[in-house]
Image (cartoon, coloured by chain):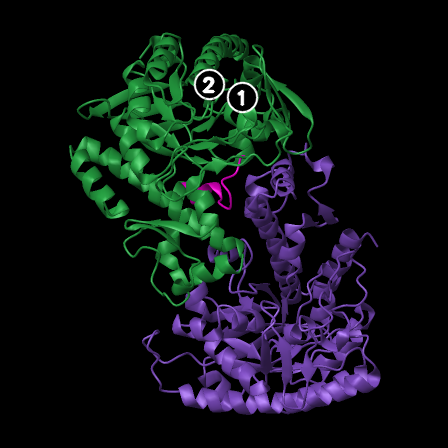
Chain colours: A green, B purple
Amino acid sequence: MKKDSLNNGFNFEIKAKLDGLGRAAVYSTPHGDIQTPAFVTVGTKAAVKGLTPEMISDLGGQIFLANTYHLYLAPGDDIVAKSGGLHKFANWSGPMMTDSGGFQVLSLGSAFGTNVSKIAKSDSGFNQVRKNENKSSIAKITEDGVEFRSIKDGSKHFFTPEKSMQIQQNLGADMYFAFDECTSSQASYEYQIEAMGRTHRWAKRSLDEHTRLEKKKKNLVNKVLGHVKPPQALFGVVQGGRHFELRKESAQTLGAMDFDGFGIGGSFDKDDMDSAVGVACKHLPEDKPRHLLGIGEPIDFFLGVENGIDLFDCVAPTRMARHGSVHTKDGKINIKNARFKNDFTPIESDCGCYACKNYTRAYICHLLREQEMLGATLASIHNLYFVVHLVDDIRASIYDGTFKKFKDSYIKRYYKK
Amino acid sequence: MKKDSLNNGFNFEIKAKLDGLGRAAVYSTPHGDIQTPAFVTVGTKAAVKGLTPEMISDLGGQIFLANTYHLYLAPGDDIVAKSGGLHKFANWSGPMMTDSGGFQVLSLGSAFGTNVSKIAKSDSGFNQVRKNENKSSIAKITEDGVEFRSIKDGSKHFFTPEKSMQIQQNLGADMYFAFDECTSSQASYEYQIEAMGRTHRWAKRSLDEHTRLEKKKKNLVNKVLGHVKPPQALFGVVQGGRHFELRKESAQTLGAMDFDGFGIGGSFDKDDMDSAVGVACKHLPEDKPRHLLGIGEPIDFFLGVENGIDLFDCVAPTRMARHGSVHTKDGKINIKNARFKNDFTPIESDCGCYACKNYTRAYICHLLREQEMLGATLASIHNLYFVVHLVDDIRASIYDGTFKKFKDSYIKRYYKK
């Protein structure tokens, strides 16, 4: 770890390794330590849907990621800044991240006039494809940045790398991401090359703006907080689609820049995950944290970790839960199904979450069928507990040398294969 | 208190009195004591919308009322019974009540082809009128009971007093209500007399069925609970609309029957509250609890208490909250209003609720405008805390002899009059 990274309140220390790229580490931030690998809970609009921050801590959540695009549109990053930053606004005292808004600008802004998906083929049955509902609202990409229309009111906005950094400094999360161009896995090879090049130029501009802003705020006492705003760390974002040679080039290019950590972004086919993620991590500096953006199926955690990933985030656990789809060690079930109306056992009898310790499948089935908010809350608590603890268990298996055995038995049971 | 009431786990002991009808008491039930006057939190479908039971206890809620009509339709009282009763189903260990379903059968079943409202004229600006959305789904009233169509699927159902008692025994709340006919305050005097007569005959049938069912379950060990189901108490429901002579007759008739407590039901003009409620309470036995059904504005609590009411319930605090309307000691405000976007103070700076201790108006405004579930949860916690603590403060003022002074200053500030 470089000295200045230690000095600014961040430190990444590898504690145990797998054969290959996998590792367990402690990532220290100004708002506390994160034991990695870790699942990052997503609170898009500065709130995890239906959960209080205490519920997130109670279920084992260490860190919370909010969304730059959504918070820029509402309430506005100026309001979050005036309130004292995201931690104070959302009442979360632990580590926080924001993404750069690149993915949302392009997918919600209907990049390329096509659907944009994180994973084109999902073998899990869970649909992660984001539909393009409004074909007319094209995001226009130039070398300078992206012009897009708001999903809220159709108003025009322009994001540049510099603007994304300024917004994310206003939001004030501990870690944030460089502004990148997230491509569809359906895009042509030529387009992937073009977009990757732009992402690299934007990465440089993001880093320059970050450095300028970090210097500027040093010794500047914040009026709301009553002290100097804590330092923030910037992660570069590796792109390159499903092409391992582009992923390699992207990792090498970004890895040579002075980022505090790295995100692996974009979309790729699930079958390419080993190559795309593994290649990227292999060519990134070993001593910095790596975050796989927006992926959250059980098998992804195992594949991600053995390919060198430290952090995961995904809206799937809570989104699924609101539709009644809940994880069990034997796979997903839909708790709204009529067969659960009379089932007076918990979602999982050996689960330690608040929902399983206190409520039956029959009750949660009833609440979700009746569109009672508490149903979504209980199912979300269960799913988040499930994924957070799965990644915790993966971490434990790295420390005690049982990763491979744990992976095989877990996947066999969950996916029945 | 009669000996058998003491024996079956219920006891109502008056501890302090106002001049006139008001009193403070302790109402003991098989699931704990209730300090009265008390506000009863409403969880229509066996869940307070957006709140866990722990949130209800934490905000000071002593007791929780669920709805017979809704639970009969879904998930079905048989499922609640099989799960071990409402307490176990909803994870609430304190006292619980169910209403009889009479109000919903008639209002949601579109009684009389007219709107049914609890209070015809509301001076608070909050609309309590239940709209008749589907004029064709008439509830048919006969001497035997009420035929109605489900709001869920249009299926036909028939409620009799006996059936309502059987359902409420299945649900297993501590206190439940006789099946009554809830009239509109717009109904003619002749109709009020007719309906009241029917309510009294149904009260007798409800009480007979209750007595039969209570005897039947004595010494019968319940398979789910592993012990004898606790005894339940039955409340008669006084009707008579806005006519004090009918309210008197109804109170005298029901008061002479062996009920454990009484509800004051039906609708009346707000201006008639003194006479309608006061007259009823004056002619009810002093030694039994009295519940004013479905009323929950700040002024109602003062008027209700001085007219002899011990228990209140209302969906208004949570329903208002979901629409952004929150109580402050200076009246209601709509927290979704744009002027609160930049307001970094709590809803009320001297409020002790979880929402006010941890979040700003700006944050709750943002969440509600963005339709984030947590916004409804936080606003509901605040409003429930507000009404629960207001009734607690009224109770304290009875004990320390400051009721009149407290009432005058509170109403002057809240209503600015």
Q: Nearer the viewer, residue A297 or A210?
A: A297
| Residue at 29% in and 19% down | A279
Whether the magenta-drawn stretch holds residue B276 is answered as no
Q: Chain of mark 1?
A: A
Q: Position of residue A244 (x, y in %)?
A: 32, 18
Secondary structure beneath label 2: loop
Residue A203 shows in this picture: yes
Q: Position of residue A85 (x, y in %)?
A: 55, 27
Q: Is residue A256 above or below residue A408?
A: above
Left or right: B186, with A307 as reference point? right
Q: Nearer the viewer, residue B352 or A394?
A: A394
| Residue at 59% in and 86% down | B161
What amino acid is found at the position of numbered circle 1 in the picture? Gln
Q: Is residue A358 above or below residue B206?
A: above
Tag 2 residue = A232
Left or right: A135, with A396 as reference point? right
Q: Check contact, mark 2 vs mark 1: CB within 8 A.
A: yes
Secondary structure beneath label 1: helix
